[in-house]
């Protein structure tokens, strides 16, 4: 398939697909006229790449990880190593920490919204010329 079709099917820009190729994350063939073509399995590969970027991994880490994953389901391939499992465990711990921090931040926002949404003694009264609300 051509790059435009892969972009459409994965909702990823053509520019991103070219970047993935530059980083060694995605492979393509070239037609005699120089156009990129991708195999059907490239759809699953791009989805995996997107998931890994969303998890906060950099392209270098993704390049290390992809050969150890099956594109079709993201499961480990026979190339997965104990080192990789240890590294992924560290990555998961980092993500868990980010989630915990985001949850704490969310709770602060909930408290602020709740406090700011409470009834005000001057709520609903039009402001006076001085900018304060009438009593």
Image: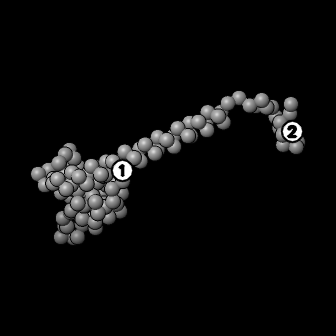
- Residue bearing mark 1: 94
Q: Position of residue 69 (x, y in %)?
A: 19, 51
Q: Position of residue 70 (x, y in %)?
A: 17, 49
Quarter of the image with the C terminus is top right
**Residue at x 14%, y 50% (from the top left corner):** 77
Residue placed most toward the observer, 30 or 116:
116
Residue placed most toward the observer, 69 or 35:
69
Q: Earlier in the sequence, mark 2 or mark 1?
A: 1
**Residue at x 23%, y 60% (from the top left corner):** 64
Q: Secondary structure at mark 2?
A: loop
Residue 41 seen in render:
no
Q: Secondary structure at mark 1?
A: helix
Q: CA distance from mark 2 to mark 1?
A: 53 Å
On screen, 91 above or below 19? Answer: above
Residue 128 seen in render:
yes
Q: Which mark is residue 128?
A: 2
Lateral position of residue 122 relative to residue 11, left or right: right
């Amino acid at each position: 398939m051509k790059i435009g079709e892969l972009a459409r099917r994965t909702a990823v820009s053509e520019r991103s697909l070219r970047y993935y190729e530059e980083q060694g994350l995605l492979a393509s063939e070239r037609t005699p006229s120089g156009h990129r073509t991708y195999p059907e399995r490239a759809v699953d590969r791009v989805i995996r790449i997107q998931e890994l970027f969303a998890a906060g991994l950099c392209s270098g880490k993704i390049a290390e990880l992809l050969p150890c994953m099956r594109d079709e389901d993201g499961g480990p391939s026979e190339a997965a190593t104990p080192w990789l499992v240890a590294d992924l465990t560290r990555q998961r711990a980092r993500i868990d920490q980010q989630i915990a921090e985001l949850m704490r931040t969310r709770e602060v926002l909930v408290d602020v919204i709740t406090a700011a949404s409470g009834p005000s003694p001057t709520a609903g009264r039009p402001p006076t010329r001085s900018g304060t609300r009438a009593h």
